[in-house]
Image (cartoon, rainbow, N blue to C red):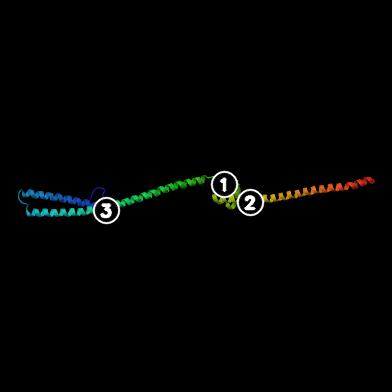
């Protein structure tokens, strides 16, 4: 007889089926005893009735013994299943905790990404030439993506600034050289003025001598 309800475990189904069989066997035995007693009245039970009752009783004992064995097996299996359930629940708890940690790490990384995307990088403030003008000068970068194009523009700006810095240094050197030359000329003129004054002072007695002769 198949078990009704949601029970699908083969062992439990067998236990239920055996229990029903034992119960039915007990009912058959009780009914048989009652019928034999009713038939015998106050007299002794016939041998055939006693043999049938003994037969039914042995069948009942067999079903009960089988039921006890199945019950013991079901008890052990229930304990095993309980342990497996506890282990599975622990694994689920561990996986749930790991999932929560992954969610936390995901939110943290999303926050870091958002912070990086909103961060005002220094290169964004560089006075770079417009993209169209840069591509007109360097058409080989026309197919670059946004990052490569920005790197190329920054390198272009660095090269231009290095060239301007070199020109500034050269001009500074020329300026210092011109300043040094002008200073030397001023010093030479100052020395010439002093020599001229000395010459004039030295020539004054000769001038007075010429004046007396004239």
Q: Residue at x 80, y 49 (%)?
A: 191
Spot occupied by residue 102 in the image (x, y as percentages of width and height) = 42, 49
Q: Residue beneath label 2, please?
A: 162
**Dots 2 and 3: beta carbons under 8 Å?**
no
Q: CA distance from mark 2 to mark 1?
A: 18 Å
The residue identified by callout 1 is 122
- Badge 3 marks a residue whose secondary structure is helix
> Which residue is at the front of the view, 61 or 151?
61
Query: What's the mark number on residue 70?
Result: none
Q: Residue furthest left?
A: 43
> Which of the marked residues, 2 or 3, is nearer the chain's N terminus?
3
Point 16% across, 54% down: residue: 61
Q: Position of residue 115 (x, y in %)?
A: 50, 45
C-alpha gap between disc 2 and disc 3: 83 Å
Residue 76 appears anywhere in the view = yes
Would you identify the image quadrant in which residue 73 lies?
Answer: bottom left
How many labels sit on residues? 3
Query: Which residue shows up at 11% across the image and 54% down it?
Result: 54
Secondary structure of the residue carrying numbered label 2: helix
Mark 3 = which residue? 77
Q: Earlier in the sequence, mark 2 or mark 1?
A: 1
Task: Say which element carries label 1.
Answer: helix
Of pointers 3 and 1, the one earlier in the residue sequence = 3
Q: Residue furthest right?
A: 214
Label pair 3/1, CB-CB below 8 angstroms: no
Which quadrant would the C terminus be assigned to in this image? top right
Left or right: residue 94 versus residue 146 is: left
């Amino acid at each position: 007889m198949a078990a009704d309800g949601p029970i699908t475990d083969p062992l439990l189904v067998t236990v239920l089926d055996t229990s029903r069989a034992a119960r039915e066997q007990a009912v058959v035995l009780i009914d048989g005893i009652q019928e034999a007693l009713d038939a015998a009245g106050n007299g002794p039970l016939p041998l055939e009735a006693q043999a049938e009752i003994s037969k039914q009783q042995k069948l009942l004992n067999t079903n009960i013994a089988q039921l006890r064995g199945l019950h013991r097996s079901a008890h052990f299996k229930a304990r095993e299943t309980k342990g497996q359930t506890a282990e599975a629940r622990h694994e689920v708890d561990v996986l749930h905790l790991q999932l929560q940690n992954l969610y936390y790490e995901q939110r943290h990384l999303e926050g870091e990404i958002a912070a990086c995307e909103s961060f005002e990088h220094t290169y964004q403030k560089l006075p770079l030439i417009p993209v169209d003008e840069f591509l007109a000068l360097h058409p080989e970068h026309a197919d670059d993506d946004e990052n490569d194009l920005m790197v190329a523009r920054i390198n272009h700006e660095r090269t231009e600034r290095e060239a301007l810095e070199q020109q500034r240094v050269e001009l500074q050197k020329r300026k210092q050289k011109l300043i040094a030359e002008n200073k030397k000329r001023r010093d030479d003129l100052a020395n010439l003025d002093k020599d001229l004054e000395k010459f004039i002072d030295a020539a004054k007695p000769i001038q007075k001598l010429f004046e007396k002769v004239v």
